[in-house]
């Protein structure tokens, strides 16, 4: 079974969304984790709301730091955004997703989160296909 660690800076938005989507889509076919390089204090409410709209619940999650033992044990680390930097670990592949940032186009609030969610969901679906093929 493949394992993936999704990482963003605060572990309150994009990495939680990616992990929630992967858990929802992969079921027990992939071990899924998320963490932050500088974890915040709570999951972003709009991130959680945008996922609830499509039947994914991340309200029980909370931001957490990267566990060094976990980092060494996963197959893949996916960083979301260029701000989240993870030091290379032998045997662990690290890729970066520069996700859509609608706020740069003046789109905010729940509309922003829906666009971010949809971008991440597309990427998660492709990744799941790669991990389970």
Image (spheres, rainbow, N blue to C red):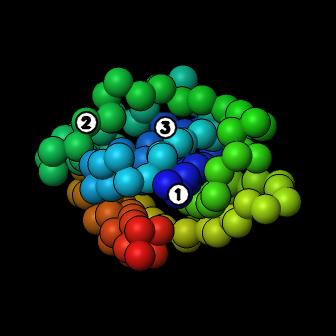
| Residue 129 at x, y percent in the picture | 38, 73
Front: mark 3 or 2: 2
Whether residue 60 can be seen here: yes
Residue 93, label in figure: none
Q: Which residue is mark 2?
A: 57
Q: Which residue is mark 3?
A: 12
Q: Is residue 8 above or below residue 10?
A: below
Whether residue 13 can be seen here: no
| Residue 24 at x, y percent in the picture | 28, 49
| Residue 8 at x, y percent in the picture | 59, 49
Could you say whether the residue bearing mark 2 is in a helix, strand or loop?
loop
Residue in the foreground of this view, choosing between 126 and 45: 126
Q: Which residue is mark 1?
A: 2
Residue in the foreground of this view, choosing between 57 and 47: 57
Q: Is residue 102 above or below residue 21?
A: below
Which residue appears at 33% of the width and 35% of the height?
Answer: 58
Which residue appears at 76% of the width and 54% of the height?
Answer: 86
Is disc 1 in contact with disc 3, using a CB cutoff of under 8 Å?
no
Question: Residue 26 lies in what quarter of the image?
Answer: bottom left
Which residue appears at 41% of the width and 28% of the height?
Answer: 61
Which residue appears at 83% of the width and 56% of the height?
Answer: 89
Q: CA distance from mark 3 to mark 2?
A: 14 Å
| Residue 47 at x, y percent in the picture | 34, 44
Could you say whether the residue bearing mark 3 is in a helix, strand or loop?
loop
Judge the density around disc 3: few (<14), some (14-19), many (≥20) Cα neighbours within 10 Å: many
Judge the density around disc 2: few (<14), some (14-19), many (≥20) Cα neighbours within 10 Å: some
Front: mark 2 or 1: 1
Could you say whether the residue bearing mark 1 is in a helix, strand or loop?
strand
């Amino acid at each position: 079974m493949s394992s993936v660690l999704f990482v963003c800076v605060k572990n309150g938005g994009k990495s939680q969304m990616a992990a929630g989507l992967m858990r929802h889509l992969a079921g027990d076919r992939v071990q899924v984790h998320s963490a932050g390089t500088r974890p915040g204090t709570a999951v972003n409410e709009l991130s959680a709301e945008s996922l609830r709209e499509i039947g994914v619940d991340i309200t029980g999650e909370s931001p957490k730091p990267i566990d060094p033992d976990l980092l060494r044990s996963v197959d893949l680390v996916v960083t979301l955004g260029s701000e989240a930097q993870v030091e290379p670990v032998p045997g662990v592949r690290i890729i970066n997703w520069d996700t859509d940032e609608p706020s740069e186009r003046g789109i905010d609030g729940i509309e922003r989160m829906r666009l971010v969610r949809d971008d991440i969901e597309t990427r998660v679906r492709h990744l799941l296909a790669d991990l389970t093929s």
